[in-house]
Image (cartoon, rainbow, N blue to C red):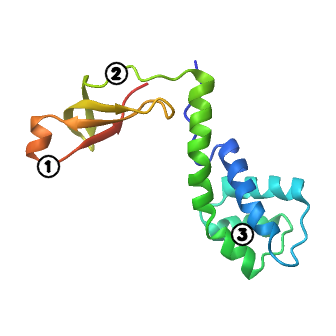
Amino acid sequence: MRPPRPTLNDPAVCAAAAAILMQRIAACDGYDLNVESDLVDLANALADGENAFGVARELDDAGWSISDDVMEILLDHDVALFDALPVAVKAWVAEHGVACRFAVGASVRGKVQGTEYVGEVTQVDAEEGPLRGARPGARARAQGQWLARRLPQ
């Protein structure tokens, strides 16, 4: 059984996002870095903090001095996480041989917010695994809705 698909709070995603943010923090004038331990602190703070202020609180608890410049960088923590996530997903797909079990053109069915839809697979992204877009069936077209959902693995 393979491990679950990476999420924003996975340690590998947080570590990659921390590396992205650390480059910007290192460029701050007068910021004294201990790169290895600070990188671990930042990755842990990204995993635990709910927002930029939570991340800053976690770093403050770890002994960081949070300047205005560092806080401004931390406000972009979610961007760094979202930039790191696709890289982790692609690595997970390659490492575990995840493949879509449906071919383009296959008819699929799924529920979105409790309503069942039938559609057709229009594209398979082999690098990102089982996330698929589907063209809606007649019922969904009549309601003006499109089906784009993660189907069971």
Q: Earlier in the sequence, mark 2 or mark 1?
A: 2
Q: Is residue 132 above or below residue 21?
A: above
Residue type indicated by callout 1: Gly
Confirm or deny contact between disc 2 and disc 3 (CB under 8 A).
no
146 is higher (above) or lower (below) than 53: above
Q: How far apart are the alpha carbons under marks 2 and 3?
A: 44 Å
Q: Nearer the viewer, mark 3 or mark 1?
A: 1
Measuring from the top left, give residue 117's x and y in whole percent.
20, 35
Q: Which residue is mark 2?
A: 102
Query: Which residue in the protein does label 1 denote?
Result: 144
Task: Indicate the position of residue 6 as horizontal and vertical percent values.
Answer: 58, 38
Which amino acid type corresponds to the residue marked 3 in the rendered image?
Answer: Ala
Q: In front of the other: label 2 or label 3?
A: 2
Q: CA distance from mark 3 to mark 1?
A: 43 Å
Earlier in the chain: of badge 3 and badge 1, it is: 3
Q: Quadrant of residue 136?
A: top left
Q: Residue furthest bottom?
A: 68
Residue at 88% in and 58% down:
35
Q: Hey, what amino acid is under mark 2? A: Phe
Q: Quadrant of the C terminus?
A: top left
Give whichever of 101, 4 is nearer the camera.
Answer: 101
Residue 34 image offset from top left, x and y in percent: 91, 61
Q: Quadrant of the N terminus?
A: top right
In the image, taking residue 122 as reference, residue 64 lies left or right, namely right
Q: Which residue is mark 3?
A: 56
